[in-house]
Amino acid sequence: REKFDSFYSDNLMYQILREHPNSYGGVQTVAHNISSTIHLPIFHLSYRKDFILDLGYRCSWIPTFNFGKLFVPLPSLPLLQILFSKAPLFGHFPSPEVLGILLLSRLFRRKRKIFVFWHSFLNFDRTSFITYLYKFYELLALFSLRFFDVVFTTSPSLIDCLIANSQV
């Protein structure tokens, strides 16, 4: 219990994202810049040995079971810390995995501050079963926005789109 309570207890806020913060992409770059500036620890779901670097802030991997392109979080100390901590949580969308963790965290800690950074909508060129699953994720994410404290976006047009689609 003491190890659980003391791990990362000196930090004021956590970030969670799907990919390692030093991998390539806009979501990862934003998370890395935030953590580099104000030294927030990051929890991520992907694991790549070539990205284990000294980034200047704590970076913890949440073990997962890979189901296609989905990283299903496994019970672990980092996952329990994210779910049960009282520290504010900052999640990066789009990510079905991060949405699930944020919703569970809200369920376990109702008064916890939870922030979302919505980077983009997912676009698909063809119709497939996976397309329908991601569309379901987006509908669930849009509905869930009302349960989070603040939603940040990357552009004013994305704000307009979120407001129009979320009916918040």
Image (cartoon, rainbow, N blue to C red):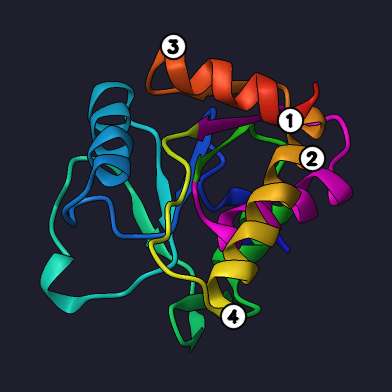
Task: Identify the magenta region.
Answer: 94-117
Q: Inspect the image, locate mark 4, and give the three-letter code of the amino acid beneath it.
A: Phe
Q: Is residue 139 left or right of residue 30?
A: right
163, 14: nearer the viewer = 163
Residue 102 drawn at (x, y percent): 68, 48
Q: Inspect the image, locate mark 1, and give the three-letter code of the amino acid beneath it.
A: Ser
Q: Mark 1 points at which residue?
A: 166
User: How much space separates mark 4 and mark 1, taking CA atoms?
Assistant: 23 Å
Residue 156 image label: 3
User: How much space separates mark 3 and mark 2, taking CA atoms?
Assistant: 20 Å
Q: Is mark 2 on a helix, strand or loop?
A: helix
Q: Is mark 1 on a helix, strand or loop?
A: helix
18, 145: nearer the viewer = 145
Answer whether labels 2 and 4 touch (C-beta < 8 Å). Answer: no
Q: Name the residue under label 4.
A: 129
Q: In this picture, is 58 found above or below 39? A: below
Q: Inspect the image, locate mark 3, and give the three-letter code of the amino acid beneath it.
A: Pro
User: How much space separates mark 1 and mark 3, taking CA atoms?
Assistant: 15 Å
**Quick check: is 104 in the magenta stretch?**
yes
Q: In this picture, is 145 found above or below 123? A: above
Q: Is mark 4 on a helix, strand or loop?
A: helix
Mark 2 Cα shell of 10 Å, populated few (<14), some (14-19), many (≥20)? some
Q: In this picture, is 165 found above or below 48? A: above
Q: Inspect the image, locate mark 2, and give the three-letter code of the amino acid beneath it.
A: Phe
Q: Which of marks 4 and 1 is in front?
A: 4
Residue 150 visible in the snapshot? no
Q: Mark 2 points at which residue?
A: 143
* Number of marks present in the image shown: 4
Mark 4 Cα shell of 10 Å, populated few (<14), some (14-19), many (≥20)? few
Between disc 3 and disc 4, whose residue precedes? 4
